[in-house]
Image (tube, grey):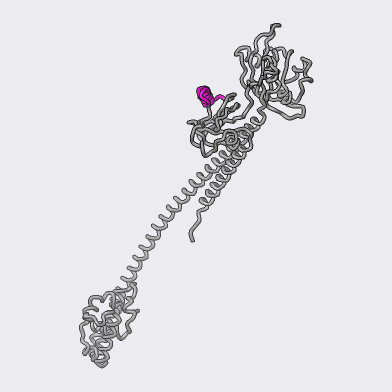
C-alpha cells in the first residue's frame, strides 16, 4: 500500500481552500457587475476590452464576444483627443468623470456620463481601467418650435430648465436668489414652494460650499467652473444619497451679485457600487493575506519535514554502517570457529583415523575407513556452507559410490568393496547421471564429479 505524506495532504487541502475562495470572489464580482444599472467596461493597460457587463450589451449593442481583446469603436471623431487625454489622466491616478457622447453599434449617438478609475494586478502594478457608463439626457436638448406658436429663447430655456432629467439650480453666492427645477426637487425630497423663503436654502448642506469663502465658491471664482464635486445628502426619511455637482459662472447680475448654474446628478447607485467594490477588494486582500499566511506555514512545515527526512537518512546511513560491522564481525567469528573445529579434528580425530588405517587390512573395512576420512575432510572443508541442491537428491549409497568414482575406482572395484552386484552399481551410476542432469549426454561421470566436486559432493551433516 502506498504511503501518504501528511504534508502533501495538508497542502492539497489548503490549495483547495484557496481555489474555493477565489471562485467565490469571482462569482461575487460577476454578480456585482450584473446588478448595477450602468454599463460597465474593463480595459487592459493597452485599451483593449477585458470584459463588459450585460447592461453594456443592451445599451450599445455589442456583445462580449465581439469586442473582447479589441478596442470599442464607439468614440466619435471629435472626441478622440479628449478620450485619450482622459485615459492618460486616469492612468496617472486621477478619477475619470466626464459628460460626453458615444456611438452605439447601430450608429445612434448617445449622451453619456462616464466615471472610472484604474485597477491593479497582484504585484501592485496598474493593470488597466474600469469605467461605468450611464446614459443621460442631452444637456442642450433641442425644443421644437412650431410656426403656430413661436417662442423666444427665454421660453425655450425655461422649458429645458423645468423638464431636464438632471437637477439644475441657479443661485448667487449669498444664497438669496435661487431657483431649481423639478428634477432637483425630487432628488432633495422637497418642493420648490417649500423653499420660496431665501433663508430656507441656507439650511440645505448641499449648497453650503457656495457661500462666500466656501470651497465651491472659491473654485468657480478662481477657475470659472466646478467639475464633479461629490457631496452627501440626508433626505427627510433618513436615507442618505450622494450627488455630483458641476457648475459654471453665469456672470455678474445688474445688482452686482454673481450667479452660478449648478447641475446635480444622483450618483447614489454608483457610490453603492463603489462601496461594494471596495468591500470586495478588502475581502480579497484579507483572503490573499490569509492564503499567504497559510502558504508561509506550509513552506515552514515543508522545511521541517525536509529536516526530519535528512535526519532519518543520516540515521539510516549510520544503521547500515553498524549492520555492516556486525556482519563483518559475524563472518570473522564464523571463520574463527571453523578454524578451531579444524584444529581440534586434526589434533584428535585424524590421528585416531590414521591409527585405525594401519590396523585395518580387509578391503571393505579399508574402504569404509577411507570413506570416513573423506567425509570428515569434506565436513571440515565445507563447514558453514549451504548443501548443494544436487547432492540433496542423492541417497547415502549414491554419495558413497560418487566418492569412490572420484577416487578413480571402476564399477567392478566398487561392487567388490561394497559387496554389491555389478548390475546394482551400474544402476546406481545411471540414477546418479539422471539426478545430475547428464543422462543420455556424452559426459564422463568421473570427469563431471571431479569438475563439480566442490559443489556436488558437499555431504549432509
Q: Nearer the viewer, residue 309 or 104?
A: 104
Classify 371 as above or below 281.
Answer: below
Residue at the extreme top of the image, as rendered:
255
Where residue 241 sits in the image (x, y, percent)? Answer: 70, 28
Does residue 134 belong to the magenta stretch?
no
Classify 439 as above or below 251.
Answer: below
- Residue at 69% over, 20% down: 161
Q: Is residue 124 visible?
A: no
Classify 23 as above or below 196.
Answer: below
Where residue 373 sits in the image (x, y, percent)? Answer: 27, 81
Q: Nearer the viewer, residue 201 or 126?
A: 201
Classify 183 as above or below 248.
Answer: below
- Residue at 33% over, 68% down: 336
Does residue 87 belong to the magenta stretch?
yes
Residue at the extreme front of the image, as rendered:
148
438 sits to left or right of 75: left
- Residue at 35% over, 68% down: 334
253 sits to left or right of 418: right
Task: Look at the image and tell me in which quarter the C terminus lies.
Answer: bottom left
Task: Write the start and end of the magenta stretch as one range.
Answer: 76-94
Amino acid at each position: 500500500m502506498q504511503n501518504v505524506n501528511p504534508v502533501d495532504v495538508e497542502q492539497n487541502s489548503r490549495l483547495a481552500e484557496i481555489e474555493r475562495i477565489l471562485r467565490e470572489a469571482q462569482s461575487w464580482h460577476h454578480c456585482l457587475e450584473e446588478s448595477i444599472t450602468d454599463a460597465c467596461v474593463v480595459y487592459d493597460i493597452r485599451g483593449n476590452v477585458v470584459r463588459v457587463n450585460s447592461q453594456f450589451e443592451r445599451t450599445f449593442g455589442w456583445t462580449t464576444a465581439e469586442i473582447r481583446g479589441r478596442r470599442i469603436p464607439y468614440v466619435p471623431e471629435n472626441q478622440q483627443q479628449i478620450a485619450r487625454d482622459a485615459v492618460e489622466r486616469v492612468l496617472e491616478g486621477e478619477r475619470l468623470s466626464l459628460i460626453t457622447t458615444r456611438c452605439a453599434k447601430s450608429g445612434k449617438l448617445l449622451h453619456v456620463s462616464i466615471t472610472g478609475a484604474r485597477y491593479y494586478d497582484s504585484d501592485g502594478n496598474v493593470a488597466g481601467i474600469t469605467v461605468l457608463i450611464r446614459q443621460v439626457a442631452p444637456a442642450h436638448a433641442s425644443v421644437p418650435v412650431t410656426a403656430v406658436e413661436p417662442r423666444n429663447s427665454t421660453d425655450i430655456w425655461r422649458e429645458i430648465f423645468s423638464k431636464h432629467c438632471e437637477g439644475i439650480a441657479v443661485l448667487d453666492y449669498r444664497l438669496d436668489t435661487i431657483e431649481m427645477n423639478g428634477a432637483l426637487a425630487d432628488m432633495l425630497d422637497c418642493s420648490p414652494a417649500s423653499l420660496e423663503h431665501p433663508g430656507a436654502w441656507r439650511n440645505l448642506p448641499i449648497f453650503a460650499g457656495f457661500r462666500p469663502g466656501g470651497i465651491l465658491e472659491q473654485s468657480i471664482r478662481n477657475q470659472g467652473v466646478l467639475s464633479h464635486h461629490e457631496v452627501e445628502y440626508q433626505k427627510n426619511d433618513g436615507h442618505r444619497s450622494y450627488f455630483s455637482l458641476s457648475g459654471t459662472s453665469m456672470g455678474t447680475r445688474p445688482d452686482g451679485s454673481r450667479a452660478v448654474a449648478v447641475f446635480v446628478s444622483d450618483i447614489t447607485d454608483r457610490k453603492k457600487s463603489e462601496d461594494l467594490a471596495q468591500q470586495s477588494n478588502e475581502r480579497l486582500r484579507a483572503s490573499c493575506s490569509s492564503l499567504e499566511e497559510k502558504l508561509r506555514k506550509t513552506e515552514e512545515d515543508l522545511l521541517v519535514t525536509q529536516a526530519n527526512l535528512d535526519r532519518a537518512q543520516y540515521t539510516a546511513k549510520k544503521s547500515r554502517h553498524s549492520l555492516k560491522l556486525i556482519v563483518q564481525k559475524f563472518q570473522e567469528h564464523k571463520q574463527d570457529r571453523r578454524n578451531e573445529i579444524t584444529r581440534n579434528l586434526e589434533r584428535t580425530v585424524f590421528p585416531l583415523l590414521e591409527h585405525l588405517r594401519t590396523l585395518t587390512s580387509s578391503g571393505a573395512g579399508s574402504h569404509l575407513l577411507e570413506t570416513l576420512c573423506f567425509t570428515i575432510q569434506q565436513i571440515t572443508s565445507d563447514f558453514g556452507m549451504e548443501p548443494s541442491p544436487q547432492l540433496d537428491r542423492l541417497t547415502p549409497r549414491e554419495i558413497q559410490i560418487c566418492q569412490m568414482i572420484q577416487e578413480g575406482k571402476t564399477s567392478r572395484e566398487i561392487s567388490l568393496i561394497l559387496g554389491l552386484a555389478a548390475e546394482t552399481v551400474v544402476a546406481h551410476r545411471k540414477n546418479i547421471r539422471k539426478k545430475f542432469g547428464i543422462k543420455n549426454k556424452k559426459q564422463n561421470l568421473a570427469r563431471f564429479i571431479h569438475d563439480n566436486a566442490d559443489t556436488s559432493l558437499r555431504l549432509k551433516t
